[in-house]
Amino acid sequence: MNTQAVKDAFRATFGRAARGVVSGPGRVNLIGEHTDYNDGFVLPIAIEKQTLGAWSPRDDGRIAFASVQQPGKGVEIDLCEPIIPSAPAWANYPKGVAVELMREGIELAGCDVMFDSTVPLNAGLSSSASLEVAAAMALLTAAGATLPPEKLAKLCQRAENDFAGAPCGIMDQSISIMGTAGHALLLDCRRLETKQVPFNDPRAVLLVADTRVKHDIGDGGYPLRRKQCEEAAKLLGVTALRDTTMEKVQAAFQAGKLNEQHLMRCRHVIGEIQRTLQAVEALRADDLNRFGDLMYASHASLRDDYEVSCEELDAIVELAEGCEGVFGARMTGGGFGGCAIVLTEANHAGAVRDAISAGFEKRFSRRCPIFATHAADGARVIE
Ligand code: ADP
Ligand code: MG
């Protein structure tokens, strides 16, 4: 792992050497989309693209945050003053983490922190969680403190919900913290129980194709889906859509209690929770064909029932489906843009990548960056 760039940036901004470097990875969700806030299951991997945080202590009770990705927009907070959200917007993520750590009773120490990320921003690979987790790791290390992973994930989520004002679920922070190389993480978003599921079959390569269509989690689509799910759960008399079945949903629809849109949203969520558990079985049985079919089914459901895909994501999935050696493909992340993932036979990966790249360019007159990824480790103290 190359930490030189972030250390150089630290020195250029703060005029002294960094004492330590920590990491928080981005993520790709293999399957289980829009299930987290319905108390369901998700199956993400941490990826090798990550946010690094270089830090060093200071003795005036202040914390400074700066980022290579936001030049000239550093901020400083005073640990003795109230900390409130303010411009620049990006710094509300690490500031929120500082506030939440203090609420957990952690006695923060003054320090400077420089971030540098290889996770593309706003691409659906969770640069936001990787930033929060890198911030938490840096602040905890500077304070000489630790927290259990589940607690840390929840606290980073609160920082994003309450401080940065983005209503994300618990998946992104959990995988960024608990990811393990060679494994996907089955996360029960209700109980916050996790299981590591092997995801390291040498016959397969996972490609990530970035539509470069900018989703915005704070925009209307995501909160609206959440609201529709909450509404449907309430009308069904359950805590969350995890607690119901398609039979009950159908009956409520027939009785006029749920509208057509509720029906569609429920069909996605209930089906997707089942698919996620089936996908775990497929991985455990080394059945990549089955796993790939579940990916396609997930995409169709997100496109048709949940209505969170877009033309560019659909095009990538269609192009992948037309290639030899592809197990499956789907959009990943919240949707409305962002990335699609393609699971392909390793010996076809180059050809698949070229075919998607060429097909996308032909159709949209621009390129979509494609990279191969694998299940990497979660947050670490690197130096
Ligand atoms: P995603 O998490 O899918 O990349 P989000 O909209 O949730 O998209 O979060 C992106 C936001 O997080 C950016 O607009 C920026 O404010 C902040 N962010 C993420 N990474 C960095 C970074 N390395 N430096 C500064 N800000 C960052
Ligand atoms: Mg995000």
Image (spheres, rainbow, N blue to C red):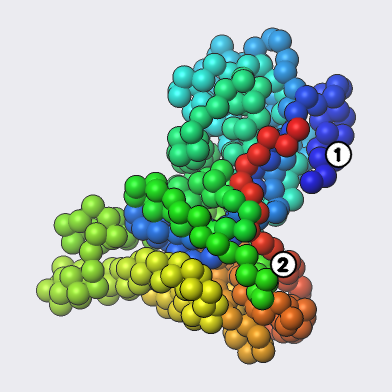
Residue for point 56% across, 11% down: 80
In the picture provided, is 67 more to the left or to the right than 258? right
Counting from the top left corner in percent of width and height, residue 318 is at 59, 84
Label 1: few (<14), some or many (≥20) within 10 Å?
few
| Residue 341, picture quadrant | bottom right
| Residue 241, picture quadrant | bottom left
Residue linked to disc 1: 4
Instruction: Name the one closer to the observer, 52 or 214.
Output: 52
In the picture provided, is 62 more to the left or to the right than 258? right
Label 2: few (<14), some or many (≥20) within 10 Å?
some
Residue for point 67% across, 71% down: 202
Q: Is residue 189 above or below residue 116?
A: below
Whichever of callouts 2 and 1 sits on the residue coming sooner in the sequence is 1
Say what secondary structure mark 1 lies in.
helix
Say what secondary structure mark 2 lies in.
strand
Residue linked to disc 2: 372
